[in-house]
């Protein structure tokens, strides 16, 4: 069942239109500098994230594990992570905790020298659903399995609502997150619907190390689960998937709301290096790419590397053309917020 679900997610994400109707990164224009006063070849893109140095502000976002197809995808992504010296997250690791024989579909990434790796579990699994909650023994096992430096707890409650077999209980999740923050370096992550100001307050107070916004604008799980529900003949869930297709907080808005309280990862809808530059411009320490890398990861490591190379090149062009010699300067580059994003920013306390 889990295996089928994971394969469904990959195939649907590869072959169907599963993006939100509007990509909010398009509503950020970085202001052009005709006189950049920067040497392109000396642009600095390195980041130090909690003592881990990486060459580019790029996170390969959590996507998969648990099947042979997932193993191949993880291997191709990990090879590219080693080459570019960038971090990598894995998809939800619950399958490995439940079935030890699936462990290697995740731990395959240990064959590569990756600056740091991120384990991944779901917030709904921290509390009892139809199965027992994820306990610390299992979390320890998952962290050790890939020598993870951070534990991502992903929030995907909209997906659970649309998913034919979804978890329905969210009571007590924050208490569990608070407890885990006392023992693990936790990163809270959304999966395409973003975090509101109230959520961000709760997470920052709980002591998360960072927030990966996973906001609205790119892949939406309402869409992915819409296709699954339709195929499984669960009509009412499919209808809800369509209705909630564009539900959520735009990625750049979540970034702005974090406002430097904790380090942030800009993700949800990043398509290229310009989007990445926009995310850094909104205060992110790095940008997370998921679906943009998926098809290439299904093909070969070489394809992933080509994609990441162009992302890097575009990032550096955006840095050059905004007169930014390093990422800190890019963070302060002049920008113009317009369109729907402007409406959102006006809603939150009169503008960005
Ligand atoms: C096939 C697929 C599987 C995913 N599985 C997970 C997962 O297991 N855990 C998680 O935290 N996020 C998962 N995500 C969400 C991504 O990490 C990301 O937050 C989301 O896709 C939005 O980013 P994007 O617009 O760059 O795709 C998955 C995404 C895709 C496309």
Image (cartoon, rainbow, N blue to C red):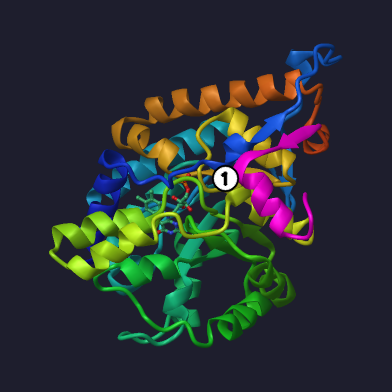
Q: How crowded is mark 1: few (under 14 residues within 10 Å), some or many (20 or more)?
A: many
Place of residue 226 in the rendered image (x, y in percent of width and height, measured from the top left): 27, 58
Q: Is residue 340 within the magenta segment?
A: yes
- Residues 111 and 39: in front is 39
Residue placed at 84% from the left, 12% from the top?
A: 35
- The answer to whether residue 141 shows anywhere in this view is yes
Judge: label 1 CB < 8 Å from ligand 1: no
Residue 263 is at least partly visible in this image: no
Judged left or right of residue 41, residue 293 is left
Q: Which stretch did the figure color magenta?
A: 334-352
Figure quadrant of the N terminus: bottom left
Res 37 → quadrant? top right
Picture quadrant of residue 132: bottom left
42 shown above or below 331? above
Let me know if residue 279 is in the magenta part. no
Residue sitting at 78 percent across and 38 percent down? 331
- On the image, numbered disc 1 is attached to which residue? 87
Residue 119, given in percent of the width and then of the height, sits at 50, 61
Q: Is residue 17 left or right of residue 253?
A: left
Q: Where is residue 117 in the image (x, y as percent from the top left)?
A: 54, 52
Q: Which residue is drawn at 21% across and 62% down?
A: 229
Counting every numbered tag in the picture gives 1
């Amino acid at each position: 069942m889990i295996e089928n679900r994971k394969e469904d997610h990959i195939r649907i994400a590869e072959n169907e239109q599963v993006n939100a109707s509007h990509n909010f990164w398009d509503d950020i224009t970085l202001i052009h500098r005709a006189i950049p006063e920067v040497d392109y070849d000396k642009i600095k893109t390195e980041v130090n994230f909690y003592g881990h140095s990486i060459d580019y502000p790029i996170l390969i976002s959590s996507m998969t594990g648990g099947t042979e197809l997932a193993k191949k995808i993880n291997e191709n992504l990990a090879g590219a992570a080693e080459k570019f010296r960038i971090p990598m997250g894995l998809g939800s690791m619950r399958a490995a905790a439940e079935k030890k024989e699936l462990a290697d579909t995740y731990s395959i990434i240990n064959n590569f020298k990756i600056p740091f790796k991120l384990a991944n579990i779901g917030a709904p699994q921290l509390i009892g659903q139809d199965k027992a909650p994820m306990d610390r023994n299992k979390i320890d096992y998952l962290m050790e399995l890939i020598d993870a430096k951070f534990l991502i707890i992903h929030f995907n409650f909209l997906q659970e609502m649309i998913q034919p077999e979804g978890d329905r209980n969210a009571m007590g999740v924050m208490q569990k997150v608070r407890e885990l923050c006392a023992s693990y370096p936790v990163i809270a992550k959304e999966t395409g619907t973003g975090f509101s100001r109230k959520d961000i307050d709760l997470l920052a107070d709980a002591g998360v190390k960072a927030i990966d916004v996973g906001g609205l604008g790119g892949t939406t799980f309402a869409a992915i689960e819409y296709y699954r529900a339709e195929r499984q003949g669960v009509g009412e869930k499919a209808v809800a998937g369509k209705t909630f297709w564009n539900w959520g907080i735009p990625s750049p808005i979540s970034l702005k709301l974090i406002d430097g309280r904790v380090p942030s990862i800009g993700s949800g809808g990043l398509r290229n290096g310009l989007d990445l530059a926009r995310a850094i411009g909104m205060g992110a320490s790095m940008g997370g790419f998921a679906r943009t890398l998926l098809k290439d990861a299904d093909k070969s490591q070489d394809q992933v590397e080509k994609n990441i190379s162009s992302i890097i090149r575009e990032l550096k062009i955006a840095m050059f053309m905004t007169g930014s010699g390093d990422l800190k300067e890019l963070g302060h580059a002049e920008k113009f917020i317009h369109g729907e994003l402007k409406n959102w920013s006006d809603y939150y306390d009169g503008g960005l």
